[in-house]
Image (cartoon, coloured by chain):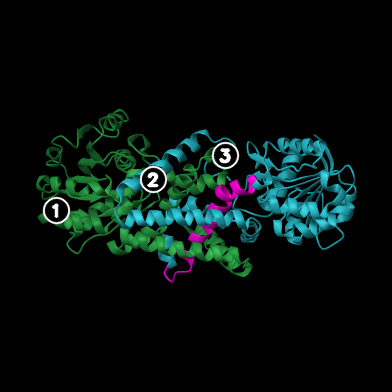
Chain colours: A green, B cyan
Amino acid sequence: MRIEKLVVVGVGLIGASCALAMRRACAVGEIVGVGRSRSNLDRALARGVIDRAVMLGDDWTREVQGADFVLIAIPVAQYRETLAALAPALGRDAIVTDAGSTKQDVVLAARELLNERLPQFVPGHPIAGSERSGADAGDASLYVGRQVILTPLPETSSAALKRVEEFWTTCGARVERLDPERHDRILAAVSHLPHLLAFALVAELASRKDSAEYFSNAGSGFRDFTRIAGSSPEMWRDVALANRDALLTELGAYRSAIEALMLSIEHGDRASLDTMLGRAAEARRHWGETATGVGPSGHP
Amino acid sequence: MRIEKLVVVGVGLIGASCALAMRRACAVGEIVGVGRSRSNLDRALARGVIDRAVMLGDDWTREVQGADFVLIAIPVAQYRETLAALAPALGRDAIVTDAGSTKQDVVLAARELLNERLPQFVPGHPIAGSERSGADAGDASLYVGRQVILTPLPETSSAALKRVEEFWTTCGARVERLDPERHDRILAAVSHLPHLLAFALVAELASRKDSAEYFSNAGSGFRDFTRIAGSSPEMWRDVALANRDALLTELGAYRSAIEALMLSIEHGDRASLDTMLGRAAEARRHWGETATGVGPSGHP
């Protein structure tokens, strides 16, 4: 795997980590970072994450003309504008991939905006992250052993798919393929829902007059449960809106589970509590012992 | 601080960790473990956590007669039987404390059953734990830097309170005092609620026919959010029932928060999502930077 000119649109945690991983693998020539925050781009330059920086407001697509690989790693709500600008600038041999947390909306936008470049686009989603954001959070090892889901279209060229798979394996990840709709349904349940539940818990506590006394008595269970509530609000707002239907289904199922739990507690129904708690503990322990592609606890 | 004979009723994660911490501090003579599982007591003996073991079914209160300090570290639903047996055996200079996650029910049981020994009892709750259970999970450092809440009664003797404070500081903890009702309200929100929410999420996913595909795409956010769902189902069933009223209040408030979130997503209300997510992220980051008494992420 060798990329001569890599353009990273969005040099945050995800984009910066890819750039650092590719550099460490000596698999990249030049890396150009594109972003909307001058100070973040400056940090990325200072850390050696990128070689050159262009603001999204400036004529950034000129950099795309000589690029053989473009990674889009910005909040999904900004894709349309970015893809529209990207399409006419993209060479016929260049590959485009992305790292967005939702895939059906990304596929829709790509279909509409990439025109004859559509076969060169491979939608993707690395199952790796951290509550930290920005170029400073970039970590060359972020993807080592982690899973990346690609959701190719019928139109996607097999050469593009192969190249994007190599890109991620070079970053240290394992690659699997899923249908975009299935991806969004599954990720709504195992990622988007827990993120929003953690945000909701902390926001509810923070809105109390005496919140300080609550927070001061919180322990390690609270710490781990709410770690993801420190994530980027903008990113998660966009994810929630982009994956609206699947997420509303999951939130509805979860609300029903809470209502069942409230009834069990209200009626002192030990048997139903035992069933629910026992099923969860067994499944969680089994998952903890067998899950691959997830780093040790406390690591992003 | 010096205890000649310590009786630990319940040699699980909490009791075994106290025993190990007191041993390491050279602050204890003999430690007798009392429990209901022979194999767990054998593990505790083999690890050197306790010097002798007595089954709860046997004549364990004979061991209490010569003891100067008794720690009760069993699920709260088993307190009544234990306190009733303990009261007549307890010497007039012995101190009793406990480590139960709820305090109003414990105070009620103690008032009813300890009779003239009530002033010798100091209700307590260490804000430390782990999803692991049993004597094997015992850790001499579990309480280092952690917070222990004591909820003394008006009748509690100041000598008993002082001695229990010394016990916990010898284990490495910081001690604070709270009213039992306030304790239960606060812990319902920052501990009992998140535990039940994590259990509910995993149980809901585990009940799906295609749960394996969901679990196989879960990442580090899911891992930390659900760590506490691997905790003891029995203990958490008892906590849920013991702190029923406060917990139902918290579950109701949380359900309302989820319903508000669903409405925001349904209506594409970016402003209200921004407010909620921003408030949570700011509060969580602030807490993460300032919280004391909580170990580093990934440590129990």
- Rounded to the nearest angstrom, the CA distance separating label 1 from label 3 is 51 Å
Which segment did they paint magenta?
A: B182-210
Q: Is residue B270 visible?
A: yes
Q: Is residue B295 left or right of residue A123?
A: right
Q: On what subunit does the disc labeled 2 rest?
A: B
Q: Is residue A261 left or right of residue A183?
A: right
Between B6 and B123, the residue placed more toward the observer is B123
Going 86% across and 55% down the picture, which residue do you hit?
A: B61
Evaluate if marks 1 and 2 touch, with contact meaning CB atoms under 8 Å apart.
Answer: no
Which residue is under mark 2? B277
Between B65 and B44, the residue placed more toward the observer is B65
Which residue is under mark 1? A113
- Rounded to the nearest angstrom, the CA distance separating label 1 from label 2 is 30 Å
Amino acid at the residue labelled 1: Leu
Going 10% across and 56% down the picture, which residue do you hit?
A: A116
Q: On what subunit does the disc labeled 1 rest?
A: A
Q: Report crowding for label 3: few under 14, some 14 to 19, many 20 or more residues within 10 A (C-alpha).
A: few
Amino acid at the residue labelled 3: Glu
Give the image location of residue B216, x and y in percent: 42, 61
Asked if labels 1 and 3 share a chain, the reply is: yes
